[in-house]
Amino acid sequence: MSKTLSPSSGLFQDVPMVATASISRAEPAQGSSRFAFGLTLFLTFVVFARPEDIFPAFGALHLTLVLCICAPLACVVSLAIGSSRLQRPRELTIVLLLTIWFSIGVLFAYWHSGSFQVLTQIWLRTLVFYLVLTQTLTSVGRIRKIVWVFLISELLATTASLLMPGHAIGDEDRLTGVSAGIFGWNFLGIALSISLPYMAALYISRRSILRALLLLATAATSMWMLVLVASRGGFLNVIVSMVLCALILLRGTKRARFVGFILVLGFVIMIGRAPGVFWDRIQTIWGGSISTSNANAASAKESTDERENLLQNSIKYTLENPLFGVGIGNFPVYNGNMLHRPDAWYGTHNTYTQASSEAGIPALLLLLFLLVTMAIHAKKSSTVFARDPADAELRLMALATLIAVLSAMVGIFVMHLLYNYLLYYLAAISGGLWAIARQRTVVAAKVNQVPRIEPQPIPVRRIPEWRLR
């Protein structure tokens, strides 16, 4: 009898050797080729870091477009030659249904050509990005690398924003940052709320001075930029993420509690050094009278009123167009024309009402189904990985993904990110984790079905008495 069939898993201890063949056949293929995954890593970096915003010369290369063509082609070739298997998580089905609904909605849009442009130029790239992630995130190593790319992109974007002057808006002197993507201006809060649990998970999972310094630098630059941006929604979203980290992830070990202490201490220090515009805007969260002489507070109050009007109008347009909405990407145009105000061309500032007002209530239901599925898969994955100490890193990644999804569900109440890469980046990770967890479950079930061969006692031979005389 073999004591351990796999050195990396405790699931297989004390299992008869007869189970070896069936277990090895149950192990999954590694997914798409290394080349396809390398292109996916590069695409993720280009999508989130947006090097063309930092160095404008990169814009002429059209890196996102080139990689959105090359990466899926590499995945298709890998599938065709049999080096990988098609991954079909439930999240993929929901995203494809959303795509079909968006496409049908173009026919009923208020501005047909505008919706068609959003579908083919914005959503199509997001879909391709999600598809290649889904097909390549097939192991813990790949998930770890794709998370690191996100964090390094955050570090580069926030560092560049802090070092490059001349990116403040209006009289409020709020920092916007150089990035026009998720790591810029008001979007930074939700990005940081998603990255914080992954930073904590990576720090806990392995001891490394270089890793610790990179994570600390990323957290520091992002938190300080968030303070300079003075985004109220982002500030609250980060607090929600930190509370969830404390309740779900940072418990049980001294190393985890140390991470929580450092995060809280750093956040307090950053807030203590915050400029006046930050406090002027934050105080409006709790209401009270706003001094008209305080331009920052008055501007924040005006912004709040505008967002309330946008929320009310998005709900109104949803009820008026419940099936297909006004068309994907059409809310700013429709709202401005209905109000006859050129200054009313703003987004919904709420992803849920963005889905319902632009693509109808069915799109909202699909979005909710997608978010709930992501949270359930992350939670179930953490439960499966908790059974084996060898899967400790996967368990931490699953818990971090659960926190990130819950934080995103809160954050998109004040952000319109329906067509952005961020939500579908999380969807790909949750689907990849759940696929690995199911494989663990299948292997464990096959091991349990193998009949245990018990040693048979040697029969005692009776010797006649006459031979003993």
Image (cartoon, rainbow, N blue to C red):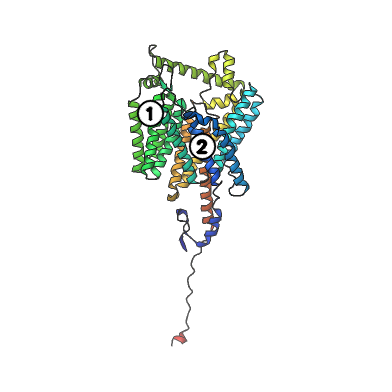
Q: Is residue 348 above or below residue 38?
A: above
Point out the residue furthest to the top here. Answer: 293
Q: Answer few, some or many: residues within 10 Å of disc 1's Cα (few below 14, many 20 plus, some between 14 and 19).
A: many
Taking depth in this image into account, of 218 and 347 the one nearest to the observer is 218
Residue 437 in the image: state x and y as whole percent: 51, 46
Residue 213 is left or right of residue 23, and the answer is: left
Q: Are marks 2 and 1 in contact (CB under 8 Å)?
A: no
Which element carries disc 2, helix, strand or loop?
Answer: helix
- Identify residue type, mark 1: Trp
The answer to whether residue 38 of the structure is visible from this angle is yes
Position in image of residue 131 (x %, y %): 57, 39
Asked whether the viewer can see residue 323, the reply is: no
User: Would you call the spot at circle 2 few (<14 residues within 10 Å), some (14-19), or many (20 or more)?
Assistant: many
Q: Residue furthest bottom?
A: 469
The x, y position of residue 443, in whole percent, is: 52, 53
Residue indicated by mark 1: 224
For marks 2 and 1 on the same chain, the one whose residue lies earlier in the sequence = 2
Q: Please give the label number shown on residue 87.
A: none
Determine whether 332 is above or below 192 in the image. above
Query: Disc 2 and disc 1: Cα gap in Å?
Result: 24 Å
* Figure label count: 2
Q: Quadrant of the C terminus?
A: bottom left
Which residue: 56% across, 47% down?
A: 33
* Residue 403 image position (x, y, % from top left): 45, 36
Amino acid of disc 2:
Thr
The answer to whether residue 66 is left or right of residue 398 is: right
Label 1 secondary element:
helix
Q: Which mark is residue 44?
A: 2
Left or right placement of residue 274 versus residue 338 in this view: left
